[in-house]
């Protein structure tokens, strides 16, 4: 009898179970069951589960691109510091900021009370709204620029080792 490393629906290894090769059953490693004891005895005899096959390069690129999109979203919505004030940069805030800027362009005397990331409030006049809007827009665009740069590198990777060496966690704006 043999066992293989079990995976979830996304192909990630599961640490708490193995797959019994003969029938595909998932066997908990640490449970107090006959199947679990049989696995532990098998492993104690020097056997090891069959390792996961390396994903094809195209599949690995797809997974890395999906992780990159998530990382960009986290960077984009992490907030931005403008003139020492922390502004949220989530999609709702971006839309509300755009509406406030339009209102201030239509009426240069327009001012709005704005809630900052630390839950404090500040009054923003026309000039301040323009400055904040430009800074938030630059932050958001910087996030997309970083994603585009890394996506190009991911798509150009010739092998899994090169792909694995691409760091998608560092270099983000903010």
Image: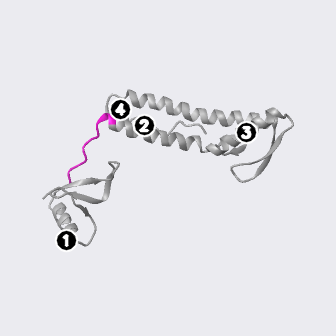
Can you tell which mark lies on residue 162?
4
- At a point 62% along the width and 43% down the height, the residue shown is 91
Which residue is depicted at the point 67% across and 37% down? 136
- Magenta residues (range): 49-58
Check if residue 55 falls in the magenta segment.
yes
Could you tell which of marks 3 and 4 lies nearer the N-terminus? 3
Corner quadrant of residue 166: top left
Taking depth in this image into account, of 6 and 96 the one nearest to the observer is 96
Q: Position of residue 54 (x, y in %)?
A: 27, 41
Pointers 2 and 1 in contact (CB under 8 A)? Answer: no
Tally of numbered tags: 4
Q: Give left or right: position of 92 versus 61.
A: right
Which residue shows up at 33% across the image and 51% down it?
A: 9
Residue 139, disc: none
Residue 33 location in percent, x, y?
23, 72
CA distance for labels 1 and 3: 64 Å
Tell me if mark 4 has few (under 14), some (14-19) or many (20+) residues whose alpha carbon lies within 10 angstroms of its own. few
**Mark before the other along the chain sequence, 1 or 3:** 1
Q: Which residue is mark 2?
A: 65
Q: Is residue 45 left or right of residue 102?
A: left
Whichever of callouts 3 and 2 sits on the residue coming sooner in the sequence is 2
In which quadrant of the rendered image does the N terminus lie? bottom left
Q: Which residue is mark 1?
A: 34
Q: Counting residues from the N terminus, which is met first, the one under dot 4 or under dot 1?
A: 1
| Residue 160 appears in view | no
Residue at mark 3:
99
The percent coordinates of residue 7 (x first, y second) are 30, 52
Q: Residue furthest bottom?
A: 32
**Residue 52 position (above or below residue 132):** below
């Amino acid at each position: 009898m043999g066992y293989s490393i079990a995976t979830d629906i996304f192909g990630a290894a599961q640490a708490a179970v193995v797959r019994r090769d003969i029938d595909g059953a998932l066997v908990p490693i640490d449970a107090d069951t006959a199947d679990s004891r049989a696995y532990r005895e098998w492993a104690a005899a020097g056997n090891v589960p069959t390792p996961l096959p390396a994903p094809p390069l195209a599949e690995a690129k797809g997974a890395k691109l999906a992780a990159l999109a998530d990382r960009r979203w986290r960077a984009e919505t992490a907030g931005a510091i403008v003139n020492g004030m922390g502004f949220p940069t989530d999609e709702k805030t971006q839309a509300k900021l755009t509406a406030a800027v339009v209102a201030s362009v239509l009426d240069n005397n327009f001012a709005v009370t704005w809630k900052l990331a630390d839950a404090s409030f500040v009054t923003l006049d026309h000039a301040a709204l323009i400055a904040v809007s430009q800074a938030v827009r630059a932050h958001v665009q910087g996030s997309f620029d970083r994603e585009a740069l890394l996506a190009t590198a991911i798509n150009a990777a010739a092998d899994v080792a090169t792909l694995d060496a691409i760091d998608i966690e560092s270099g983000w704006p903010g």
